[in-house]
Image (cartoon, rainbow, N blue to C red):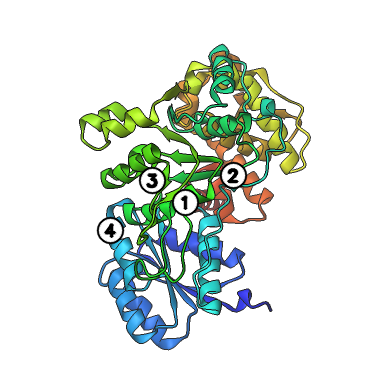
Amino acid sequence: MSEQETKKILIVDDEIEMRIALEATLKREGYETVTAENGQVGLDRLGKEPFDLVLTDMRMPEMGGMDLLRSLKKHYPNVQVVMMTAYGTIDSAVESMKVGAFDYLLKPFSAEIVASTIKRAFLKGASGAIPEPIDEEIETQPEKRPPERRIVTANAKMKEKLEFVENVAYSKSTILISGESGTGKEMFARYVHHCSPRKDKPFVAVNCAALPEGLLESELFGHEKGAFTGATTRKEGKFEIANKGTLLLDEITEMGVKLQAKLLRALQEHEIDRVGGRESIPVDVRVIATTNRDIKQRIRENEFREDLFYRLNVIPMNLPSLRERKEDLAVLAEFFIEKHGKEVNKKISNIAPATLDLLKKYSWPGNVRELENTIERAVLLCRGETIQPADLFLDEEEVSTTSSPSGAEAFVGKTLHQMEKEMILQTLEEVDNNKTKCAEILGISIRTLRNKLTEYEAKSK
């Protein structure tokens, strides 16, 4: 048994669904897990058996995460602690870092983030120093794909925007890309980088909504050793890492007003100050910012600096929603079918006309990202070589409001309940009865899946 497989983790959360999901995720990573529904139960567990790491929520009845953390640092100082929090308790999360937590996770988070954070926590325990986070958003090598493969579109307005990007990419001017979530703002930012003279230099992306202001400042500008509790080494910020390249500030409107002032100075002076630093550091970075909010409304609400808006909005770009570019549905669906078909080694040749009609009737609130997730699921569920309407696995409300008469043929002889049951059982079979994975693919909660399976079992008796 490897060293990682021997690590034992205590999961403390009052939500049973979260405990089940985390337990499944960590077991897949090879860890041994035990769960507790609040801090007091967690402490009782710690008194009976040893643990290498505690993963705990902030807000819980009887004993919350902060009280548990303080008790752990007093009685079990060698146990690593990772906190979990929602946006409403971000200040407490920062405080937890000062008390001694290794890191914290903002809900909702992906399984990959959990695994990466815990791996770093164990590495710190072994070396005594905090390792740098695994950052998959830093590209230091030139893009290998040709530009035309990066953004798939048949829409005239989108093609005009691609030409616009090619015309402005050579400059250093800041770009502000706005649009709904899932419209491809980050893809356009990467396209700008690819078309620019900086394409052989780093592309660095930072999600401004994922970190509270104190930690986002350190993430962007870096910090000196001893600048705050836990700063055991000097750390370069993303501005320095992106030097000579491109820095993407995703969801810029979620940045705190105080930090906006420091960002404005960096953009104007082309230099940054590390947290705790005494000297300014010159940087040459092309900044691209994105937002899915009405930034002018944020200015009226005094949540965003007007001078920073004008500094970022030198080259404005607004991306249309998928609802406004229906002609892209067919080409995008074909692209995603080919992409995900290769991933699961399935040969799917086309998409049924009724299926395409159903795609065109749907409003796609999640835009291209939602479409890709839907097609990925359809590829997995498809039994033949053609994607059928039922493979999209839309729920009853979506089907009743978005389907058309031409798509009815695919439903002849079957009720929605029957199709739902078939899709759930088929997906379970495809993932070797892994309920957590099945729920993720179908876009439902683990609780909903369990209730459905219980219902099917009861009716079969």
Residue toward you, 343 or 255 = 255
Name the residue located 51 percent from the left edge and 43 percent from the top edge.
Answer: 443
Where does residue 249 sit, x and y in percent of width and height? 44, 40
Identify residue for label 1.
451
Q: Relative to 333, is 108 above or below?
A: below
Considering the image in quadrants, where does the N terminus appear?
bottom right
Identify residue for label 2.
202
Q: Quadrant of residue 203?
A: top right
Where does residue 318 sit, x and y in percent of width and height? 44, 22
Disc 2 or disc 4, which is closer to the eye?
A: 2
Identify residue for label 3.
209
Marks 2/3 in contact by CB < 8 Å: the verdict is no
Going from the N terminus, do you reach mark 2 or mark 3 first?
Answer: 2
Where does residue 246 sit, x and y in percent of width and height? 53, 39
Q: Is residue 393 visible?
A: no
Q: Quadrant of residue 336?
A: top right
Q: Is residue 180 visible?
A: yes
Disc 3 or disc 1, which is closer to the eye?
A: 3
Marks 2/1 in contact by CB < 8 Å: the verdict is no
**Real-space Cα distance between discs 4 and 1?**
37 Å
Q: Amino acid at mark 3?
A: Ala
Name the residue located 32 percent from the left edge and 69 percent from the top edge.
Answer: 98
**Real-space Cα distance between discs 2 and 1?**
48 Å
Disc 4 or disc 1, which is closer to the eye?
A: 4
Q: Amino acid at mark 2?
A: Pro
Marks 2/4 in contact by CB < 8 Å: the verdict is no
Residue toward you, 460 or 394 = 394
Residue toward you, 405 or 4 = 4
Going from the N terminus, do you reach mark 4 or mark 1 first?
Answer: 4
